[in-house]
Image (cartoon, helix red, strand yellow):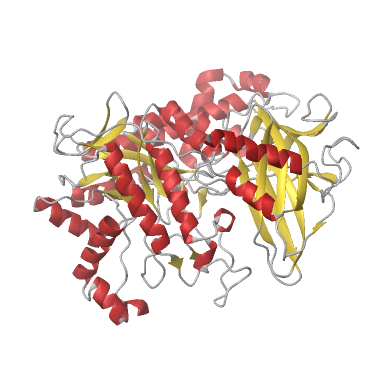
Amino acid sequence: MKMFLHLLVSAFFITSCSQPQNLLTNPGFETGSGEAPEGWSGMVTRNVQSHILGTDTSVSHSGKASFKIARVWCYPWQQTGLKSASPVKIDPAKKYILCFWYKTKGIDEYPLALVSQFKVKCDTAPTVTYKKSISNSDSWQQHFILLDNIPADAKELDLSFYCWIRTKGSIWLDDIEFREASKTDVAAFEKWRRRPEPSPVGKSEKGKFAATGFFRVEKDSTRWWYVDPDGNPEWAIASVGDMPNLNDPAAKSDWFRTTYGSTHEEVARSTYGILNNDCGFNWFAGWTGQGLASVTDERCNSGKTYMPLTQVMNLSDAGDMKEAYARDKNGNLLNKSGHWVVDPFNPEWRKLATAKAEKMIAANKGKKWFAGWYIDNEMDYDDLFRFIWADYSSKEFIKMLKEEYGTVENLNKAWSSRFATYNYVKFDSIIADKPEPKDWDDPSWPDFMAFERRMMGEYIDFTYNLVKGLDPDHIVISNRLHLGAMPHLYRTIDLWGKYDLICMNIYPDNNMIGFNPGELEIMKKLHEGTKRPVIIGEWSVPAIDSKLYQFGRDSLGRPLDWSWPQVTRTQKERGESYRMCVKQLASLDFMIGSGWFKTTDVNAKERRANRGLMNGSFELYRDLTDEMKRTNDELKKEMELPW
């Protein structure tokens, strides 16, 4: 019945989208040709080195043509696609619906290659960008986006569609409509974005596995599990545990003292109780502080139920030792916003990482309540093959080329093509020149890809062997992989299977309630490629009613947060999204848990974002946390979890 209703909603949109109210010119690309059919213009940002872009009369959803984006070779995050040729006038008091047909073919690199974007221009307020990622589809699929929260002084927008990854595959767009949305449209959209709720897979059984005294991961006939020290299967329903700071002005109130206490120890126990009892969590996610770890330690040692912990090591953080980081031909470091990527062959980094690991492991070695170590956090390995020119990696690259080609003359002959002619007189000349591949057909590309695998494999082998050697009892978890870099993971994904557990950080874009099909497909590919269980290390959903997403800069001068495109409307809708996401994860037999980020909203001088279970005054968002509690308790019952 639910699927039937879903089809009815789609049928409604199809009918409505045929009405003569479209604000776009040439929605089916029937007039004009090439990269700029009537009403549209091609869009190619910097560092897009090759692409196929333009109308395609051999493929269409309706009529005689569609618009094709294909075989893109670009740097990360660059845009290849099309945009409305002229700005579209809008009324900020109204709502608008975008519907379009699309399909993809041969995009094996990443399941979310297409982005739809609005850039809303205002009279005085800064331009606001709305964007949504679209799941790959090998057949024509209709997609919908509702624009219903517009700055009061908005006047017009640019609409664009683009491929943001390097891919050999193709995207087609057709029958695009952007129009005012009626109440019926809004209701239909709300039905379209909701899907049937899946059921969890597998039931825990007390003492099913051997008791080893420490946590590990293991699979039974139904799914992968965490296995606790006593041999009980567990599924981690986790949240970051960040405690209120007693120096915060909000912690001085009578309400706070009554609710949390007035000492560090009292606040830790109260926060622990809120996360476990009020919200229903049974684990702590990464970044949980020592205060809550102390409560877990105390409870475990007294024989009580406890919330296990993990910890992030950040082994790739080499501090000010710049020579330890991967670098490109221009000397730029592969170190974005503190998400380090090292030259894994650098012996000084290895010493630094060893010393860090020894110090961190000493604090938790032998503790049964401690589950495991995340090696790194959101390491930005985008285009690692272009960042092989640090001292030690570049020498290893030359060594590999010498072994493969024997003589530099053989290399010159093999690499020369329509893209470049090479006349190196010795192998070391390559380091001075620092070439890089220019297209999928560039004959140097396989060698750069092969060394990227060697470089990543060296990092994985070293970090795993280091931590496992120092602490054989606890789980060794991968770098906390995040979506920004994951379009590049397919080239090395099998190597990551050396870790005991694979971690992925993801923030759903919330155009649909729950994770969209492409987001779920990424999780599946991660498991299939590594053959290991997966955990979501970080995820959460923000909402507009937190009042942290005012347009423009707020009274403290803070800009609209990067999480803006992911917002839902209300805390109640956050709760609905939480329920769907957790149910989806529990229905995947390779997933062993997830970690909500975070306890308290990000509301500091430099940033504002509704990521917390509670606001800046440490008050729970009850519409959210009541649904969390209901969902988490239901999940524990359905999966027969021990606590």
| Residue 34 showing in the rendered view | yes
Residue 266, by quadrant, is: bottom left
| Spot occupied by residue 368 in the image (x, y as percentages of width and height) | 16, 44
Which sits in the foreground, 626 or 216? Answer: 626
Question: Left or right of 632: which side holds 530?
Answer: right
Figure disc tally: 0
Camera-nearest residue between 375 and 620: 620
Where is residue 449? Give x, y as percent.
Answer: 55, 29
Q: Residue at x 41, y 58 (%)?
A: 624
Give the vertical position of 425 relative to 506 (above or below): above
Q: In the orientation shown, which residue stands out farthest toward the left?
A: 302
Can I make out residue 286 in this image?
Answer: no
| Vertical position of residue 132 compared to residue 251: above or below | above
**Side of 209 where 384 appears, left or right:** right
**Residue 371's spot in the image, x, y percent?**
24, 43
What residue sits 13% from the left and 33% below the top? 211
Which residue is rendered at x = 40% and y = 51% of the image?
318
Q: Nearer the viewer, residue 335 or 495?
A: 495
464 or 68: nearer the viewer: 68
Q: Residue furthest front?
A: 1
